[in-house]
Amino acid sequence: MGEPVSVVFFIFSLLWCAAGNFHIPFAAVHSVSLLLSGVSWFKYAARGEQLFLSDFAYISQIAGVTGSGNISITAYIVFSFISGAVLFGALLKRRFESPSVNRRAVCLGVSALCAAFALNFGGAEPADNASFTASFFGNPLDAGRVESDFEVMAAIIVERNAGEAEEETPPEVNTARTNLGADEPLSEVSTTQSALGADEPSAEPSATPSAEPSAIPTEEPPAEPPAEPQIGYNEAYLLARLKDVTDGIPADIQYAETKPNVIVILSESFWDIGTVDGIELSEEPIPNFKRLAEESVTGEMISVTFGGGTADVEFELLTGYLNRFIETDLTAYESFLDKPVMSAASVFKRLGYRTVALHTYTKEFYNRVNAFKHLGFDEFIASEDLTDPVYFGDYIADSVINDMIIEQYENKNGPLFAFAITMQNHQPFPKERYPEPSIRVLNEDIPQALRESVEVYLHGVNESDRELQRLVDYFSAQNEPTVILFFGDHQPTLGANFELYRYTGEITDTRNRTPEQFRKLLATPFFIWSNYKEETARFENIGANFLISYLFDYIEQPKPVFYHFLDRLYNAGHFLGRRELYINDDENILPEAPPEDFELVYLYDMFQYDMLTGEGYAVGELEGFPE
């Protein structure tokens, strides 16, 4: 919200100078500030992000994919509106019968504002009635939260390593960069052995040579092993840890000669409502998906977001990077993807594939038109390129994007990598969207508005399920080997303030969710199907950042060293969220990474920074294929 506030005060200064008095500028600026604060509040509640000036560049596109169905009037809104009206009226009117009336009006307005903010942020309002008083990520966090996490992480790593050392040595201070933000000093960073490398024996002190001369030459004392590099963003540390990764890559990996076509489908809001307890339906919404999943590699992907933010999921899937490590007010697509960045597309391109991105919405949204170019796609085809596309409800139908995939396959030269983003099941879900839904909710006590939203959503998902089967049937009949990775990007927003989960009782306190509840809100289904393999497996929890690395193993093709590092990371932790959620190798759901995994997570941050915006100490090795 910092940028809009700066602009508001700039406007205030101009109006003050132009009007020559304080009252009118203050009243006008108060109104604008109240409006921006309200918009920022709703945005933070829905997406976990504040309002920024750059949001207004996408206002027409955002308006087309959001609705008011999940916004309800709360005490905060009422108090704010009343206080704003009182202040505006008091300051706009130049004269009153008594100056004390003016003062009383201003004091009343200020008191009402204070009460409103106390209700909103102090927790006085019941959670069940505060549809947007708690954001998805809980209470607002300060901007330095992530930097602080990694400073603490580095200190814990050093403390643990120092405890393992045989001799205590004075700590050294390293002011290396710890994240994508400003340089922050690391406290108590020593040169003891890193947890990622093999344990090195400490050099024994050499024996004191005899003072008496001897006719027999004495042996030279053994050379001391080289000191471990300082933990932090520096070339020696990154290259040392990179060697740990490359040394662990098997030398006898066998690759397939045939390069199958690879199709990745991000299905908007695709989700199995059957994972929610207590919802009774007239029929199964996604029978084809479930049957295909039983014959495939399948499981639950843990998304980085809920209810929106598809570009964040795309970024993690395509690059293997984490949004957690990016300090930006916007998506990665909108902020810093202004140069070539290694992604699944660029890797497939190096392997001889044609790479194409397909989307049934506009190219400009989320700046995909530029981002996909820097990610290595040969072509990006979106709604602007379509002639009279078929709609299903409010958005272009999934049947259209399936036809786009088939057209790319039938006109290709060489193997194809297609990344398709659907739009059919995007929010909102008003009852007018599908007046006669095909699937009914049988629960008698469910609120009517929630019932209607769920039925509208399921009607669209059921149609997507039929289209999925049509696409699989088409490729089942083809001779060329083809692989399909199909997954939902995030769960849909059904009702206000997680109303569906509150109705079933799985979430009772929306302000203080447990790690298990966070995991429940983030899980979406996926499968990897092929027309030439009969491999089956199940992943209980896997982050989107790990899926492409596994996909390269599935098709038995080479992958960069960085993806091998991700394999090593996955063996420790299957998901690392923006905050407050970590799922380790034992499927334990934790609020954060345990100390034994800290250095791996810390190194992940360093590698990502080095490859995206850092000095590039290890870029060549990380992006290269193993030798």
Image (spheres, rainbow, N blue to C red):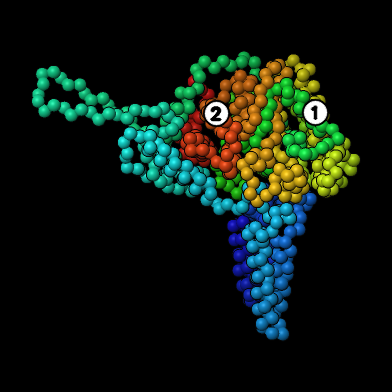
Residue at image position (74%, 63%) is 78
Q: Callout 2, which amino acid?
A: Asn
From this viewpoint, which residue is outermost toward the bottom? 97
The residue labelled by disc 2 is 571
Q: Could you say which quadrant of the image residue 361 lies in? A: top right
Q: Quadrant of the N terminus?
A: bottom right
* Above/below status of 30 relative to 174: below
Q: Nearer the viewer, residue 199 or 389?
A: 199
User: Where does residue 348 sit, x and y in percent of width and height?
Assistant: 62, 26
Q: Nearer the viewer, residue 58 or 306?
A: 306
- Label disc, if present, on residue 342 of the rendered structure: none
Q: Residue at x 62, y 14 (%)?
A: 257
Q: Considering only order in the chain, which callout, 1 or 2, is on the residue closer to the N terminus?
A: 1
Q: Is residue 422 above or below residue 407?
A: below
Q: CA distance from mark 2 to mark 1?
A: 32 Å
Q: Nearer the viewer, residue 207 or 549?
A: 207
Q: Nearer the viewer, residue 181 or 117?
A: 117
